[in-house]
């Protein structure tokens, strides 16, 4: 049986601010923003990812303190380019750091959302030729 990680709840204090940050600054796709009788829920997905993040006001989405989620990790083919893109959009990013390791995957930088949820961005250059998710070419 396959087990796939498809959603991670990110605890935030302001859903509108979180959507603006993740969609407009970081570049995630807003899949939906839904008001339900139990509260609001919004799902955003990074380009090329099979896993989304969810923010909202429903009780099960409010069980963690806003800003308490640390250790989320994104992977990109080029950390320098990814960091430059985020900085150009207004995201404050940590400096790039490299571990003393010649293997692909030893380059990182970090950023935080407005509540302080912390993300690491890892460079795995091989993703440029071998993405984990198939890219939609737009042709049938």
Image: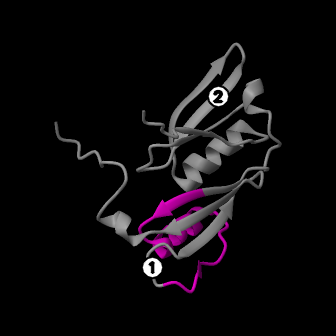
Asked if residue 45 lies left or right of residue 117, the reply is left
Residue 62 x, y percent position in the rendering: 78, 33
Magenta segment: 73-101
- The residue at the point 50 percent across, 43 percent down is 51
Asked if residue 91 lies left or right of residue 57, the reply is left
Residue 26 x, y percent position in the rendering: 56, 55
Asked if residue 138 lies left or right of residue 84, the reply is left
Residue 116 covered by magenta stretch = no
**Farthest residue in the front direction?**
1
Residue bearing mark 2: 41
Where disc 1 sits, the SS reads: loop
- The residue at the point 80 percent across, 44 percent down is 66
Say above or below: 72 vs 98: above
Any part of residue 57 in sight: no
Residue 114 x, y percent position in the rendering: 74, 53
Between marks 2 and 1, how big is the CA–CA gap?
40 Å
Where disc 2 sits, the SS reads: strand
**Farthest residue in the left direction?**
140
Residue bearing mark 1: 103
- The residue at the point 49 percent across, 49 percent down is 46
State the quadrant of the N terminus.
top left
- The residue at the point 51 percent across, 52 percent down is 27
**Farthest residue in the top direction?**
37
Q: Earlier in the sequence, mark 2 or mark 1?
A: 2
Residue 89 occupies which quadrant of the picture?
A: bottom right
* CB under 8 Å between discs 2 and 1: no
């Amino acid at each position: 049986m396959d087990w796939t990680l498809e959603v991670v709840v990110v605890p935030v204090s302001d859903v509108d601010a979180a959507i603006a940050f993740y969609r407009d600054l970081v570049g995630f796709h807003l899949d939906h923003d839904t008001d339900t009788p139990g509260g609001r829920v919004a799902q955003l997905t990074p380009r090329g990812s099979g896993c989304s993040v969810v923010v909202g006001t429903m009780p099960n989405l409010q069980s963690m303190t806003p800003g308490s989620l640390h250790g989320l990790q994104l992977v990109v083919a080029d950390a320098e380019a990814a960091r430059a893109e985020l900085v150009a959009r207004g995201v404050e990013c940590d400096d790039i750091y490299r571990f003393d390791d010649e293997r692909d995957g030893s380059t990182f930088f970090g950023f935080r959302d407005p509540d302080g949820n912390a993300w690491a961005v890892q460079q795995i250059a091989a993703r440029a030729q071998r993405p984990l998710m198939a890219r939609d070419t737009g042709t049938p």
